[in-house]
Image (tube, rainbow, N blue to C red):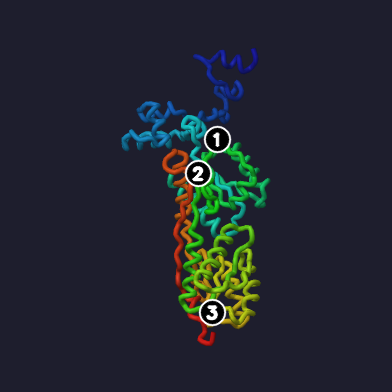
Amino acid sequence: MDTVERASANLPGPVTEVAGTAREVAGGTPAPRRTRARTTASMADVARLAGVSSQTVSRVSNGYAGVTEETRRQVLAAMKELGYRPNSAARALKRGEFRTIGVITFTLSTTGNVRTLEAIATSAAAEGYAVTLLPVAVPTQDEVRGAFSRLEELAVDAVIVIMEVHLLDAATVTLPPHVQVVVVDSDAGDHYTVVDTDQAGGTRAAVQHLLDLGHRTVWHLGGPEGSFAAQRRTDAWRAALTEAGRVPPPLVRGDWSADSGYRAGLELAAHDECTAVFAANDQMALGLLRALHERGRRVPDEVSVIGFDDIPEASSFLPPLTTVHQDFAEVGRLCVQAVLRKMRQVGPQRGTTLVPARLVRRDSTAPPPSSV
């Protein structure tokens, strides 16, 4: 018998745990005792402490109705005291849903995408859903296909796509059967459930405002080729002028950035007959304002400028920018509501919902110079 066993044999009663040397057990200098790893609390532990059934604990964990507020508080207090955390994976398997929405987008550099994503996340959280972002590094078919392939590895119930729908179609995407899709792009037609701003309506309001001020025509600083939002605004600009009996001037393009607006502005400033410009977004309008200022073309005395988006800084431009307001919060909210309807199979499963845009008049527009 070794030292520990002899010491144990001289102790009365059963020995359940031996720590340290025999000298320490027999009454020598105490040594620090090893503590056992804390056991994770179970649902049954919570039920015993709260004095309720395990079924009641389950109902509180899953947010189901039918539990009194007093009982709910009692169960939540027991969970907190025991450090109990519901097993989200197990709950998801039991419910058949993960309460997570995936969002696929290929850029977070534009105001529209960032603010739409923010609105989606806020609206999803209000409904008890989390958001998983799947960024696409380059807007190519392979990248889009790869993003959707990752959906099969992630626990998501639905996906909201913030990108040009032609990439989605061309990528020949195969979705997991349970995943519902909503697209933020009105050109998707009836093939998808779509939520978008009324791009054409906002553009027409901008052009008409400038014509009503007395400008003979309106020049357009358009967005990049390949962007459906830019194309919608360009088409609506051209149609509004044609319907008013005006000849559309040559289109000048940018890439959504203020730098591209500045470069385009230097070109537009050289045209003395240019008295009104509709820019496809506020960032390009900002660069345009700088270029016009550097070329000595006063805004709005000589040239009126309108943007699109109504970013928070638009009212601080010099002069404050007249622009078309997009309700990104409403777009995001409606995306989440559309996803939830599809998951619950309630209401129409396809079609387009357009959120109205409105003109915000500030100081960057005025009647043309009397000499024009």
The tag on residue 299 is 3
The tag on residue 45 is none
Q: Which of 336 and 302 is in front in this view?
A: 302
Q: Which amino acid does label 3 sit on?
A: Val
Q: Position of residue 46 (x, y in %)?
A: 41, 30
> What quarter of the picture does the N terminus occupy?
top right
Quadrant assignment, res 259: bottom right
Secondary structure of the residue carrying tag 1 is loop
Q: Which amino acid does label 1 sit on?
A: Pro
Q: Residue at x 43, y 47 (%)?
A: 126
How far is disc 1 from disc 3 in space, using C-alphas? 55 Å
Q: Position of residue 2 (x, y in %)?
A: 65, 15
241 w.r.t. 214: above or below? above
Secondary structure of the residue carrying tag 2 is strand
Q: Which residue is drawn at 53% across and 47% down?
A: 160
Evaluate whether residue 282 shows in this view.
Answer: no
The tag on residue 130 is 2
Q: Which of marks 3 and 2 is nearer the N terminus?
A: 2
The tag on residue 177 is 1
Q: Which amino acid does label 2 sit on?
A: Ala
Q: Which residue is drawn at 46% across and 75% down?
A: 212
Give neighbour class at mark 1: few <14, some 14-19, many 20+ (Cα, 10 Å).
Answer: few
Q: Earlier in the sequence, mark 1 or mark 3?
A: 1
**Labels 2, 1: front one:** 1
> What quarter of the picture does the C terminus occupy?
bottom right
Evaluate whether residue 194 shows in this view.
Answer: yes
